[in-house]
Amino acid sequence: MSTVEPLPNLDRSTLRERALQALRGAITSGQYRPGDHLGEVELSARLGISRGTVREALRHLQQEGLVVAGQRGMLRVNTLSPKEVRGLYQVRAALEGLAVATIIGSPERDVAVTTLRAALARLSEGSGGFAERVEADLGFHLLLCELAGNPMLVESWRHLEGRIRVAIMSHDVEQLPGIMSRDRHAPIVDAIERGDVAAAVAVVDEHMAVAAELYATA
């Protein structure tokens, strides 16, 4: 009977994932704000892990769009210009417009509507703190893409997620209006339930346009 060799990179990989989750959470919760410097030495000390592991995690966050290299290669939390924010939400509108149109044309539309209405319940205004509201909001939009049944659509949306979070966290959270509320999202589900593609796409376009102007003027 042959001996099974251990996986030598398992512990390192686990540490990297933990570091990645910790750093991502610190950025998306506002602990680190757009423009803040992310030093390997400081982060290594705070997390109790090697600089190499921190470096790997930061490299991954660069790929997600949460972190960007500045002067002399110094890493900072990404900052989006108003033009970039508007472009980001134009692409979101195109992706989620495709999602709602695909759902409406699917034989599983009724099931999708039921699933989306359950997600709306988590968007009730005032429930939970700001971080919970952000997660419920992004969770709804990701679910919309997932229900379209197109893996490439989901992958494209996921590729934008880091920048979406940067745009949200660039805004003064105390001044956020009801852009994340249930009432702002319910019309999307209503239009899907009616099977009205034009209305559903128009609602998504309007939702993204409002969000773009909100976050572009943060």
Image (cartoon, grey):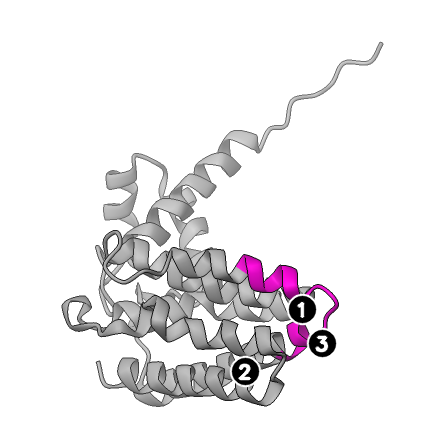
Q: Nearer the viewer, mark 1 or mark 2?
A: 2
Above/below status of 205 relative to 19: below
Front residue (pair 111, 26): 111
Is disc 1 in contact with disc 3, using a CB cutoff of under 8 Å? Answer: no
User: Between marks 1 and 3, how big is the CA–CA gap?
Assistant: 18 Å
Residue 140 at x, y percent in the picture: 46, 63
Is disc 3 in contact with disc 2, using a CB cutoff of under 8 Å? Answer: no
Which residue lies under the disc numbered 3? 105
Q: Secondary structure at mark 3?
A: loop
Residue 133 at x, y percent in the picture: 31, 59
Query: What amino acid is at disc 3?
Result: Gly
Q: Is residue 213 magenta?
A: no
Query: What amino acid is at disc 2?
Result: Ala
Q: Count neighbours of disc 1 (C-alpha within 10 A) and say few if under 14, some if 14 to 19, many if 20 or more.
A: few
Query: What amino acid is at disc 1?
Result: Met
Front residue (pair 180, 213): 180
Q: Secondary structure at mark 2?
A: helix
Residue found at x 64% / y 59%:
111
Q: Count neighbours of disc 2 (C-alpha within 10 A) and say few if under 14, some if 14 to 19, many if 20 or more.
A: many
Residue found at x 43% / y 68%:
65
Which residue lies under the disc numbered 1? 152
User: Between marks 3 and 2, how big is the CA–CA gap?
Assistant: 12 Å
The stretch of residues the image draws in magenta is 101-115
Q: Count neighbours of disc 3 (C-alpha within 10 A) and say few if under 14, some if 14 to 19, many if 20 or more.
A: some
Q: Secondary structure at mark 1?
A: helix
**Marker disc for residue 200:** 2
